[in-house]
Image (tube, rainbow, N blue to C red):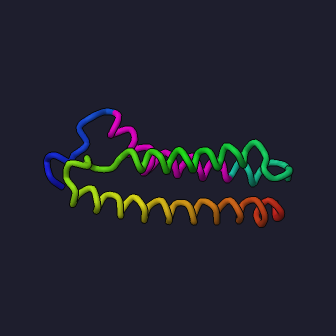
């Protein structure tokens, strides 16, 4: 990583910290809350919060791209962001389906 593309603002650091650690941790916590709550109509309030949190994580990842002035780094950063977003989306939706329709029925 070059000197120019390092995180050097507090906002950039917080965005990266959020999409790497805090966002997925919040998704996991909300999935546990959904599993432990009474079965409710879909979409419930917790389901809407879960989906909103997923969208916020995706926006935080897109905000953490390198500057457009460096075309090659921007292309690599965008490819990486799209891979992360697709993996996160499929994982989060799969976890939501698992928690909502399987684990909540077992508990």
- In which quadrant is the C terminus drawn? bottom right
Compared to residue 77, the image places residue 12 above or below, namely above
Residue 102 percent across, percent down from the top left: 77, 66
At a point 57% along the width and 50% down the height, the residue shown is 54
Q: Residue at x 39, y 44 (%)?
A: 63
Between residue 94 and residue 38, name the one nearer to us.
94
Q: Residue at x 52, y 52 (%)?
A: 24
Q: Is residue 47 magenta?
A: no
- Looking at the image, residue 29 sits to the left or right of residue 65; the answer is right
Decide which of 65, 29 is in the foreground and name it. 65
Please give the range of residues in magenta: 11-31
Magenta span dominant secondary structure: helix
Place of residue 22 in the rendered image (x, y in percent of width and height, measured from the top left): 48, 45
Residue 32 located left or right of residue 20: right
Q: Nearer the viewer, residue 103 or 91?
A: 91
78 in relation to 25, above or below: below
Q: Position of residue 31 (x, y in %)?
A: 67, 53
Point out the image quarter for the N terminus.
bottom left
The residue at the far top in this view is: 10
Name which residue lies at 72% across and 60% down. 99
């Amino acid at each position: 990583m070059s000197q120019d593309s390092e995180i050097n603002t507090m906002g950039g650091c917080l965005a990266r910290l959020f999409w790497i650690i805090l966002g997925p941790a919040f998704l996991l916590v909300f999935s546990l809350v959904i599993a432990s709550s009474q079965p409710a109509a879909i979409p419930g309030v917790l389901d809407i919060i879960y989906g909103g949190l997923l969208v916020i994580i995706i926006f935080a990842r897109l905000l953490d791209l390198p500057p457009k002035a460096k075309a090659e780094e921007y292309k690599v950063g965008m490819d990486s962001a799209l891979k992360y977003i697709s993996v996160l989306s499929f994982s989060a939706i799969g976890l939501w389906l698992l928690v909502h329709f399987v684990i909540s029925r077992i508990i």
